[in-house]
Image (cartoon, rainbow, N blue to C red):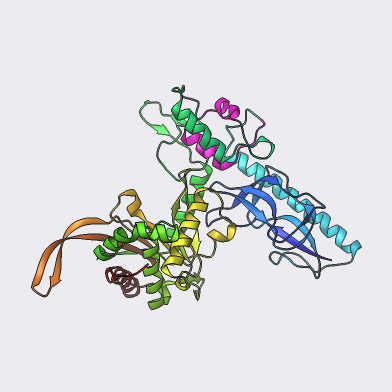
Amino acid sequence: MGKLELRMPKMGESIIEATILNWVKNVGDKVEEDETILEIATDKVDSEIPSPVDGVISKILFKVNDVVPVGEIIAILETEGEETVDEPISEPAESPKQAEPAQMAAKEVAQKIEVQVQEATQAVAPQAISSSNRFYSPLVKNIAKKENIGQAELDAIPGTGANGRLTKIDMMAYLKNRTQGSTSVPQPAISNNVASSKPANPVPAVRSASGHDEIVQMDRMRKLIADHMVRSKHTSPHVTSFVEADVTNLFNWRSKIKKEYQAKYGEKITFTPIFVEAVHKAIRDFPMINVSVDGDNIIVKKDINIGMATALPSGNLIVPVIKNADMLSLQGIVKSVNDLANRARNNKLKPEDIQGGSFTLTNVGTFGNVMGTPIINQPQVAILAVGAIRKKPAVVETEYGDLIAVRQMMFLSLSYDHRVVDGFLGGSFLRKVADYLEAFDPNRGI
C-alpha cells in the first residue's frame, strides 16, 4: 500500500492561498481518479479538486474554512502499489514505528502553518463580515461589495450550497430580483478584504481632516495584484512596440460568416480565435518569444500555450490557457476559447486550465481602448495587447495607384522583457502578427 500526498493546487500566477469550502470526501472514503475530493475558493474562482488516483483517504490535514497556502499538503491518500507523492515532499517509507513520529511531526507542522496563516490573515485584512457564523467565499463577498450589500442583507439571502452556503448562482438570482423590486436603503460597506481587480468605487476607510480626501486601505487581492505587477517591473526591463494593422479582410469575413458558423458548429466566433491563430503562427516563426528566464538560463518552451485575459462577472480578471494552440484548427481554437471563457464566468475552471501559459494575449479593445502597454505576466517574457477595431481613412495601394479608402484598422502593442528580447526580435515578431492578420483570406471557408 502506497501513499500519495495531495497538495493545494496553484490557481493562478498571483494566487498564494485558498480557502477550503467543503470536504466532499471524508477519512476512510474510497475515491476514484478524477472524483471530487474537496471544494476550494480563491479571490478569483471557486473550484472542485479531483483525486489524481484511485485510493482511500487516510488523513485530512485541514478543516473547512481553513486558509491554506498553495503547495501545502491538505490530505493523504492510500493507494495500491508503491508510495507516490504529488510533488517531492517526504522521506522514503519507513517501518511503522519509525513512520509514526514523522506523521506526528507533519501534523504539528500543518497545525503551525494553519495558525500562522490565520494570524497573518487577521493582521493584514481584518474581516468585517464577522457578525454571523455563516461562511462566505471570497467570490460571494466580492459580489456583495460591488453591489453594496450589507451584512444583515447578506445574512438574509437563502443559500443552495452545502450546509446552506451562499453560492454565486444564489447571489445572481437575488440581485436580479433586487433590481426588479423596490429601491433598497444603502447598506454599510463590506470589508476591504473582499477581492476586486477594479479600482473603481473603492470602499472608504478613513476620511481626512479636511473632509475632501479619503484614505482607502488596499484589500488583500489588490495587494497581491500590486505585488505581482511591481515584481514584474522589477524583474523585467519592459519595452513596448506598436504597429497598426489593416484588418478589413478578417473583419468583413467574420461579419459575413458568423451566423452561418454558429448554425453549423453551434459556437459563436469572435475575433479572439483569429488573433490566437496569428500569434501561434508568429511564435513558430520567432520561437525565442516563447521562452522564460531562470537565472542566467533561457528556457525555450516547445509547447505554445497561449493565455487569454478573461473578465469575470465579479470584476476580477483570470487568464485561462489554450494548450498547444498551434496544434488546433481555427474551429478548434474557437471551441477552446468559448469553453474556457464560459467556464471562467461560471467558476468551473480547473487548476490546470490556468497553468502552463507561455505567452499572453489581452484584448484592451473590449474596453473601447485603441492601444495599451500591458505588464508582462511573469515568468513569461512578452504579452500582446490588441486594441479596438475602428474605421479610419487609410492609403491603399491599387493597380491604378495609391488611393485613400475607409478601412478597418487596429493597433497592436507588444511589451517584452529586454533582458532576452531585443528590439529586433520584439519588433519583428509584432510585425509578423500584424502581417498574418492583414493577409487573412476573405474567401476562407468554415
Residue 304 within the segment the image draws in magenta: no
Residue 392 visible in rendering? yes
Q: Report x, y in % for residue 307.
A: 46, 62
| Residue shown at 45% from the left, 44% from the top | 315
Specify the farthest residue to the left: 400
Along the horizontal axis of the image, is 51 left or right of 45?
right
Q: Name the residue rendered at 29%, 70% in the picture.
A: 443
Residue 298 left/right relative to 126:
left
Tell me residue 15's x, y (percent): 56, 53
Front-lying residue, 268 or 354 = 268
Task: Say whether residue 418 is visible.
Answer: no
Residue at 27% across, 56% down: 389
Region of the chain picked out in magenta, as a range? 133-158
Q: Quadrant of the N terminus?
A: bottom right
- Residue 380, above or below 117: below
The answer to if 145 sits in the magenta stretch is yes
**Residue placed at 30% from the left, 56% from the top?**
371
